[in-house]
Amino acid sequence: MDKTFIFGHKNPDTDSICSAMALANLRSKLGEEVEATRLGELNKETEYAFKTFNIKAPRLLEKVEPGTNVIMVDHNEFSQSVDGIEDANIKMLVDHHKISNFKTKEPVFMHSEPVGCTGTILYKLYNQNNVDIDKESASLMLSAIASDTLLFKSPTCTPDDIKAARELEKIAGVNLEEYGMNLLKAGTNLDDVSEKDLINMDAKEFNIKGKKVVIAQVNTVDINDVMKRQEGIEAEINKAIKDNNLDLFLFAATDIINGNSELLALGNSADAIEKTYKLENHRAFAEGLVSRKKQFLPLVENNL
């Protein structure tokens, strides 16, 4: 039996890595030979989750050879996936984003739902397959949900996410509110993160109306603490624009306590943001905006 590699998107967030591991645990219990992998380094939030539950990180996967069996989680756009994905044998997709630019050579199993987190879908898959959820898998899925829904504050959060998290909380043996807030705060300690890493730690590339767009996001408890580094951040963004022929790079510093974001827009299509927000020094305050999937991405799509 050929091994199947499971992975989330590049510049992985907590949902991307934790969901890959939780799905690998499920498929293994169903008798399949699988391996969870990651397409980038762990961020501080994910490191906190793994340290809390004593979980070992999966190995880094840089590319796949033609015909390699793979399962994609938490993404479906090839621009966000592993190098060589176009020629891989995609066996399954588990995702909570809109389906875009996804093309396969053969039919695949697809599990896609409009929920706040891939971990929520995996919780349902465990139940549908009558597989008991062990503590490690519960901890992984719970961490993913707390992260992606900003502890239920994100507009992407659904009753399904809350229900799954409350059940997983019992199995993981933690207080969700306490653990979740500590998890989110762990990801906001950015003082020793370089500007280059800052713009890449949670960045996704999109092809929108023929334009190449990157939307990057960092969580913080103090927007000013991030934006005081604007000059260095802009230098790295402009380098990324030049190196990757980007039309727009939208960087969002999101206040997880108050639920707002500061946007920084650069590129020859940055004027698209000004159709909604007035940019001053390339920046705009976006009250109530916290979600890339449900708020930042539609903002760009509607204005380009």
Image (spheres, rainbow, N blue to C red):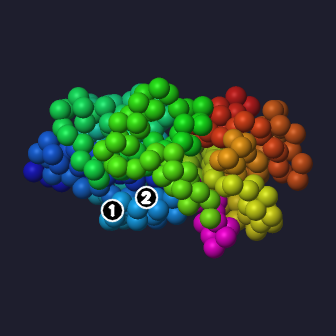
Q: Nearer the viewer, residue 216 or 207?
A: 216
Q: Is residue 22 magenta?
A: no
Residue 163 visible, this angle: yes
Residue at far bottom of view: 192
Looking at the rendered structure, the secondary structure element under dot 2 is helix
Q: Are marks 2 and 1 in contact (CB under 8 Å)?
A: yes
Question: Residue at position x 33%, y 62% from top?
Answer: 55
Rendered view: 235 above or below 35: below
What is the span of residues highlighted in magenta in the rendered image? 190-202
Residue behind mark 1: 55
Q: Position of residue 299 (x, y in %)?
A: 70, 33
Question: Residue at position x 47%, y 62% from top?
Answer: 48
Question: Residue at position x 27%, y 33% from top?
Answer: 125
Q: Nearer the viewer, residue 58 or 50?
A: 50
Distance CA(mark 2)–CA(mark 1):
8 Å
Q: How many other residues sit within 10 Å of disc 2, few (<14), some (14-19) or many (≥20)? A: many
Q: Position of residue 75 (x, y in %)?
A: 44, 42
Marker disc for residue 49: 2
Figure quadrant of residue 212: top right
| N-terminal-most mark, 2 or 1 | 2
Figure quadrant of residue 242: bottom right
Q: Is residue 199 magenta?
A: yes
Looking at the rendered structure, the secondary structure element under dot 1 is loop
Q: How many other residues sit within 10 Å of disc 1, few (<14), some (14-19) or many (≥20)? A: few
Under mark 2, the amino acid is Ala
Question: Residue at position x 54%, y 36% from top?
Answer: 152
Under mark 1, the amino acid is Ile
Q: Nearer the viewer, residue 77 or 44?
A: 44
